[in-house]
Amino acid sequence: MTYEEANEIIDEKLLIKKEPFNKISKYIESCKAVEDRYYLYTNYVERLIDLFIYDYIFYGKAPKMFDKTEYIKALENSINHKPYKDYWYNCFLEFHKGNNVKCLTELKKWFSDDNNPFKSKKMDEIDAIDMFIRPFKEGFPELWEEICNNIKTIQTENGIFELLDMYKRFYTSEYGEDSIEILTDFTVRYPGFVSPHEFLGTVYFDLKHWNNSLAEFEKVTELAWYIYRKGYIPFMMAYSYDKVRDYKEAEKYYQLCIERNTGDEFAKNNLAYLFIKQKRFSEAIPLLEECISEKRGMPYIANNYVRALIGLGRNKDAKEFVKNTEFRIAKDIKEKVKKLDNKNYKKVETKVDIINDNNDIEEEELIIDKRNPVPLFQFSTEKILEDELTARIENGNPVFGKKLKVYRRKGDYGRQYRIFVDGQVGIFDLLCEDDMGDLYIIELKKDSGYDDVYEQISNYLDWINKEPKFKGKKAHGIICLNSPSKELINKVHEDPRMEIYNYQISYSKL
């Protein structure tokens, strides 16, 4: 038996037939040739580890595909049957058994081992991900300290220590805005690394910042997806494009998922629903029928199928499906089907490229003007003000008397736009542009007391004027805050590049 043949056997048993762990172990033990058992156990250990560590950045989000107790038992048995000791495997095993002291002991042995492969070759980003970032995500603080303290005892490429130190801080930070700050500060300082963009794209995705998520994933080339393996990034991109109503791109990425047989049932259902939203019912039907024939237990697939049948005028078919299906149908859909007659009609489909989701924001919600009134209500955080203005802009509503759009290019999105200049990280709250291509840096402050904002935005405008990719663009600055000081107002009025706006929230009894 060759190593490759052993790999195929383990794949078939574990991933295709999904045999129980103890049955696979018995099969390996039944092989008489020592070399065969060696190849099988080696592949089994690697497959068990891969199965557990890929395709998510937190163990808390791991798919519940198997019982962890049985998994640990199978992993321990396989490692113990390998013909030689491997300290890294032992370290991984003890980590997941919760034996922190033993885990650290094995890790130290791995670093000091003369057979450590990185005594003779340099560890790169992919190696660091394979050895530390994927296996020890959410590791206890002492583990990450040990990794960072010992990483300089082996050979590494430039920036690997900083990369691991950044992930140590990421995994001890509060997930959300703190995580974003840690990751983005690293990416502007070390632009050559790939995995932080995957992490950033995922965090933005979880926070429903769809355009930011897309911009980060667009920075990652297809052949260099480091954290994910099964097409998760195309799926998240498709979902994000759907949310920002770019249906053409959403369709492209859902099709990519389907072609690769990744996230299959979700991609097929979501693509079908995308077609339904565009009244392309006949394109939705085969996707949904395929899922139903494979008995994929997702009720919304069945609900979408009924929607598509109704959209095609196949009332009789819809009624029969609702009556006979084993899937649970939503109450409102059942009620709708009840009211239909028992006939099938031929309908001419009209393709709709863009659906108006009617998400426009009422103009009365926020008042922005150039006056300096007595302070009224103000936003509790700048993020809420930023959310409000971003939503307003993205829904096509004018702000500051202008029709703007958030700056968007492949790999770039203008919300929380970070730059690195003179050794410092700078952040634009919003980078926007108008129909003429003029740029607008918008700085938002929830209240007064930010007189240094003038110098801040002035430096940003100077940077834009020197930045090659913005060559030939006119740049303007907009400062928006509650009750600005007279000194700040005077500074801005003397600078033709800038405007200042006071915002207030007011409520009127009707």
Image (cartoon, grey):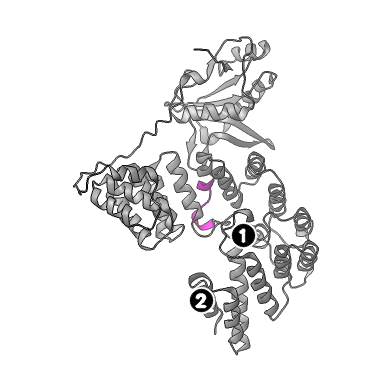
Q: Residue at x 55, y 46 (%)?
A: 201
Residue 252 visible to the viewer: no
Label whose residue precedes the other's in the sequence (2 or 1) = 2
Q: Is residue 41 left or right of residue 257?
A: right
The reply to whether callout 2 and callout 1 are in contact (CB within 8 Å) is: no
Q: Is residue 14 magenta?
A: no
Q: Residue at x 60, y 69 (%)?
A: 48
Q: What element does badge 2 sit on?
A: helix
Q: Position of residue 312 (x, y in %)?
A: 25, 47
| Residue 147 against residue 173 in the figure, above or below | below
The answer to which of 260 and 285 lies nearer the viewer is 285
- Residue at mark 2 to residue at mark 1: CA–CA distance: 24 Å
Q: Residue at x 19, y 47 (%)?
A: 345
Q: Residues within 10 Å of mark 1 (few under 14, many from 20)?
A: some
| Residue 74 against residue 362 in the figure, above or below | below
Q: Amino acid at mark 1?
A: Ile
- Specify start and end residues of the magenta stretch as a single range: 216-224
Residue 8, labelled with which disc?
2
Q: Position of residue 296 (x, y in %)?
A: 42, 60
Q: Residues within 10 Å of mark 2 (few under 14, many from 20)?
A: few
Location of residue 45 by image quarter = bottom right
Q: Is residue 42 left or right of residue 437?
A: right
Residue where numbered disc 1 is placed: 126
Viewer-side label of 2, 1: 2
Q: What element does badge 1 sit on?
A: helix
